[in-house]
Image (cartoon, coloured by chain):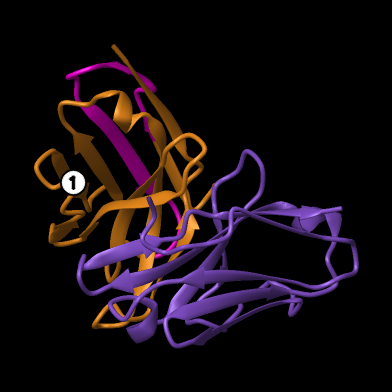
Chain colours: A purple, B orange
Amino acid sequence: QSVLTQPPSVSAAPGQEVTISCSGSSSNIGNTYVSWYQQLPGTAPKLLIYETNQRPSGIPDRFSGSTSGTSATLGITGLQTGDEAHYYCGAWDSSLSGVVFGGGTKLTVL
Amino acid sequence: QVPLQQWGAGLLKSSETLSLTCAVHRGSFRGYFWTWIRQSPGKGLEWIGEIDHSGTTNYNPSLKNRVTMSEDTSKNQFSLNLTSVTAADTAVYYCARKVSSIDDRNTWFDPWGQGTLVTVSS
């Protein structure tokens, strides 16, 4: 059971927009920054968003992040078939004194 | 070369010790914490622990009694040992560089190693 809660799956059509939620608590998301990772099939996770809403070099602005209270959201616009992947949120947890992750959300682009 | 390259035994028997090593090929070894993260089959990610260039470590409390991390700054490498493994330790293990603020409230991992599948059989 992951500390951060994500929906197991989301789906949308190409060109559409989708959001993925990540729910935590005051010991993590409510008091820290959030990062997001994209894991394509058979590959290692790749940093997608850091510092809650910042994109590393090379990540298109179709990807965005935000937080509200103890929840975080990853938004993806202009969906492409290449976006099909698992997405994970992560945040520092002051109770654990370590990083906790969500269970991952599988994005299907129909 | 890839930024992080990892290796180690992929098949273990219960009670044996898991040993993995990760080489940092690009960027500075100093100034960062170097991390191990695992992903059990069909499940999410679990932070195992971290080590910096001076040997300072932090471990996940759930694994603390079985985990040891070490570093070799002369080779820009760091290692993970996990003792007394069971089937529950079967997972893909990743090494990664931790980037963070001084108080860790702003933390992320980039880049990641390619991953090593470790299977524990009884």
Residue shown at the point (44%, 34%) measured from the top left: B116
- In the rendered structure, which segment of residues is drawn in magenta? B7-27
Residue shown at the point (31%, 23%) measured from the top left: B87
Q: Which of the 4 image quadrants contains residue B109? A: bottom left
Q: How many marks?
A: 1
Residue shown at the point (26%, 47%) measured from the top left: B78
B24 versus B41 height, above or below:
below
Residue B21 shows up from this direction: yes
Give how far across and how far down residue A11 sits, in percent: 77, 58
Give how far across and how far down residue A35 sits, in percent: 49, 72
Depth check, front residue: B113 or B90:
B90
B99 versus A81 height, above or below:
below
B44 versus A77 height, above or below:
above
- Answer few, some or many: residues within 10 Å of disc 1's Cα (few below 14, many 20 plus, some between 14 and 19): many
Depth check, front residue: A22 or B58:
A22
Residue position for label 1: B69
Residue shown at the point (22%, 53%) measured from the top left: B73
Give how far across and how far down residue B62 sits, in percent: 18, 48
Q: Which of the 4 image quadrants contains residue A70? A: bottom left
Amino acid at pointer 1: Met
Residue A56 shows up from this direction: no
**Residue with the most extreme bottom position:** A68
Left or right: A14, with A67 as reference point: right
Left or right: B101, with B64 as reference point: right
